Amino acid sequence: DAMVIQNPRYQVTQFGKPVTLSCSQTLNHNVMYWYQQKSSQAPKLLFHYYDKDFNNEADTPDNFQSRRPNTSFCFLDIRSPGLGDAAMYLCATSVLGQGAINYNEQFFGPGTRLTVL
Amino acid sequence: AQSVTQLDSHVSVSEGTPVLLRCNYSSSYSPSLFWYVQHPNKGLQLLLKYTSAATLVKGINGFEAEFKKSETSFHLTKPSAHMSDAAEYFCVVSLGTYKYIFGTGTRLKVLA
């Protein structure tokens, strides 16, 4: 089955120690997203890629970076994790909509739960 | 500007009774709307989507939603709740080519 895969499912890191989360997809979608979701909140968009074009949200901290080496893979790098970065990180994919209205849904991975000690 | 409002942060129902989760949107034109479900420590799963083809949309697991333009609503319903329906539900509106706006979520609790 076509899907979005995230590894690892659970990640524990130390305060200030860089960490990388990975996402892969078999859907061949041209858009990939990274969201941060804290407890009992809606997902918050960090950035997205349209093919190789990177788009950062204005309020995404500089501490967060991303790489997309090819269509299938996308990585989230947290350079110096703080306690406030503990959250669920969700990867999603979609097909870019055409025109003013996008009827294409997002497909989500299972998420990576990040704990910062 | 487009936005989405989920009117209830928590909803409790008894097993076997109907479910109603409310969502209102604001849009300058006919929107694209989605309902997702999220179980604890899991990703989001699409329940259904509105694509303008039909105002009553049927989704998975017995859920359906009705698009009402006059009321700017897209409420999610299910005739009979099951224990496995207990989860967080998000109403989402598409902003156009790639961006989606999430409602704040409704936590559904199903009582035995």
Image (cartoon, coloured by chain):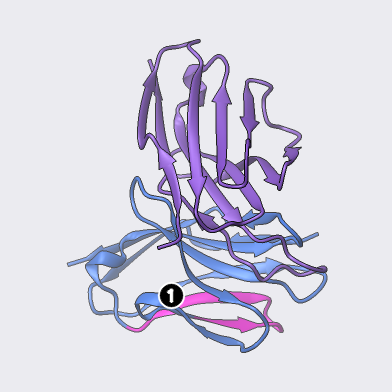
What residue is shown at x 37% (from left), y 27% (from top)? A11
- Residue B81 picture location, percent across and down: 29, 75
- Residue B50 picture location, percent across and down: 61, 77
Which quarter of the figure is the N terminus of chain A placed in? bottom left
Tell whether B92 sits left or right of A86. Answer: right
Q: Which residue is mark 1?
A: B20
- Residue B108, image quadrant: bottom left
Q: Label 1 is placed on what type of residue? A: Leu
Magenta segment includes A35: no
What residue is shown at x 63% (from left), y 32% (from top)? A67
B41 or A40, which lies in front?
Answer: B41
Q: Main secondary structure of the magenta part?
A: strand
Which region of the structure is painted magenta? B65-79
Circle 1 SS class: strand
| Mark 1 closeness class: few <14, some 14–19, many ≥20 residues within 10 Å | many
As drawn, the chain in purple is: A
Q: How many discs mark residues in the rendered view? A: 1
Q: Residue furthest top?
A: A16
A34 or A32, which lies in front?
Answer: A32
Up the image or down, B29 lies above or below A33; here it is: below
- Residue B66, image quadrant: bottom right
Tell whether B110 sits left or right of A74. Answer: left
Q: Colour of chain B?
A: blue
Which quarter of the figure is the C terminus of chain A placed in? top left
What residue is shown at x 55% (from left), y 41% (from top)? A73
Magenta segment includes B67: yes
